[in-house]
Image: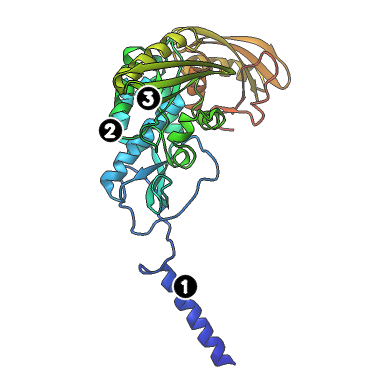
Amino acid sequence: MKKINIINIILLISAILFMASPGGNGFLFANQSVGNDVKEAPTHITVTFPVREEKYLVELPAGDYGESERKIGFTRGLRAIFIRHSHLAHIMENPTIREALAKPDIYVKQFSYTVKNNINVSGVRSIFLRIKFEETAIAKLLQSTSDSLWVSNKPLTLLWLARDTQPGKVLGGDNDPLVHYVTHKSQEYALPVLLPLMDVQELNSICSRDVCKFDLHKIRQLSLRYEPTLIAVGCIRKSIFNGNLSGRWLLLRENRVEDFNLEAVDEKTLVSKALAILAEKATNVLTYVAGENSRLVLRVSGVTDYGQQNQLMGYLKSISRNVTQVELININASNVDLAVNVSGGIKVFSNILAGQSKLIPNPNGDELPPGIDLNYRWVVPGG
């Protein structure tokens, strides 16, 4: 009996070693933290699946595990993070942002690799690079550039665009010439346009058929992560009458839907016409503008005496030149309510607060009473 047990133990240990060996079918973790030096990816990879959307996490297709391909992925991922958290498509024009994109690994907290089925090609498995970025460093960078970023008088428009003539992937996040044309042409019309990232979440959730069927429920759900003011949906089709290209376009604004149809001889002309109409329709939509003074009411808990009240007010005036005035509105045993004048509005002020550590969001900060715009807690220095 003892001899049989020993044999079973030896067989079990051998099986475990085989699973972890280069020839086994097990998976070894490739989750790596990143400093200034980018590490080589190991041969083995982790198969992981995102459980929930994280604001500083992206997952992108990767051609291989090499350093060059990884650097491209870091740059693409960081570009998406900047757009996501600034709400501006033309953020890449800022010199500070361009400098950051030249050294993206500085902002990477950790990365890993994933292998998943490619929904666009049956039976093919693709490599994906999963990147988590440093939240504090990115918030500080956006704060430092806030004066030059909030310059648009038109809202951010998320554009879902697909070709009915080429069933498959939705345009965005690839090397399609039409993607570059949309980016270039939207700048001419001063229209901040963002194309979807088309990372693994979107690749597994939407295709050109969904866009051309105008599945608005699915499109609205996938648009939530970008928090756009407007959503535009376009489908390019071949005209059955004269061989030209035609396109149906929808503009979604809150609960309103506007519909228009266009026709042109080629894709670029068709897209140019659509962007011109979108720019005109977006002109009257209110958005936050750099230089526009907004009066916000900030509720702060944790202020225990008069000295801390003065310290808090002085601190708010010093953290950014976007803060132009701070006034006391109300004070009680639990909270201090302050009126804060901010150039650029609540989005800019939220970026400013995200880049410091003495004011932190209250756990119940989303449940705001009437008249209160933001709810934070004052952390006593050294406490």
Mark positioned earlier in the residue sequence (1 or 3):
1
Asked if marks 1 and 2 touch (Cβ < 8 Å), the reply is: no
Q: What is the CA distance from the residue labelled 3 to the residue labelled 2?
A: 47 Å
Q: What is the CA distance from the residue labelled 1 to the residue labelled 3?
A: 62 Å
Drawn side of residue 310 relative to residue 131, left or right? right
Q: Residue at x 43, y 57 (%)?
A: 29
Q: Position of residue 139 (x, y in %)?
A: 45, 28
Classed neighbour count for the residue bearing mark 1: other residues with Cα under 10 Å, few (<14), some (14–19), many (≥20): few
Please tell me how many numbered marks the rendered image carries: 3
Q: What is the CA distance from the residue labelled 1 to the residue labelled 2?
A: 43 Å
Q: Residue at x 29, y 44 (%)?
A: 69
Between 80 and 180, the residue placed more toward the observer is 180
Between 117 and 303, the residue placed more toward the observer is 117
What's the mark number on residue 16?
1
Residue that numbered label 2 is attached to:
102
Mark positioned earlier in the residue sequence (1 or 2):
1
Instruction: Give the residue type that dot 3 points to.
Output: Ile
